[in-house]
Amino acid sequence: MMDLATILRPEAVKALHGVTSKKRLFHELAEVGSTVGGLNVTDVSAALQERENLGPTGVGHGIALPHARLPSVDSVMGLFIRLEKPMDFGSVDRQPVDLVFALLAPEDAGVEHLKALALVSRTMRDSSLCAKLRANADPATLHTILTETQNVQAA
């Protein structure tokens, strides 16, 4: 059973100020991927941008779910960033984005990648969870909010 606690490490959660472009955001996500999984910043950033070029990953309600597959990733990895100031993301509902949950997956992840995406998407559809995320700027608290809810629902 896949849960967010498995794919989202505490050090993969950040609250950031002053991010105003997707390029900058993808760079920040790549930095987190580098810290958490020793990934190459340029590779991650480019892969996220490439996926974004296919169509915006802003899913509405201020949430974006950028994702990419990379040969250097050995298991599905989540990265979460809460933006202090919402930014335009080309989302379906035209709402600026302030909650970003990125997924990096191995190139051949197939169904694992889709399962993780479905899980994240389901979790982020919970409006009370998102309200809690928006009310907190402490990365440890954000991680707890994201990973605890899961267990409650599974029980």
Image (cartoon, helix red, strand yellow):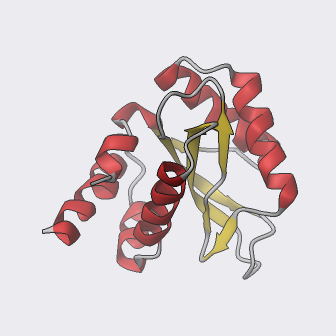
Q: Position of residue 43 (x, y in %)?
A: 75, 26
Q: Position of residue 125 (x, y in %)?
A: 46, 75
Q: Which quarter of the picture shows residue 148?
A: bottom left
2 in relation to 73, above or below: below
User: Which is more toward the observer, 96 or 41?
Assistant: 41
Q: Position of residue 36 (x, y in %)?
A: 47, 25
73 in relation to 111, above or below: above
Q: Is residue 21 visible?
A: no
Q: Position of residue 115 (x, y in %)?
A: 46, 58
Q: Residue at x 76, y 38 (%)?
A: 47
9 in relation to 153, above or below: above
43 in relation to 116, above or below: above
Q: Is residue 70 visible?
A: yes
User: Which is more toward the observer, 154 or 93?
Assistant: 154
Quadrant location, the N terminus: bottom left
Quadrant location, the C terminus: bottom left
Q: Residue at x 59, y 53 (%)?
A: 83
The reply, left or right, for residue 83 in relation to residue 144 is right
The residue positioned farthest toward the left in the image shown: 155
Q: Residue at x 67, y 44 (%)?
A: 68
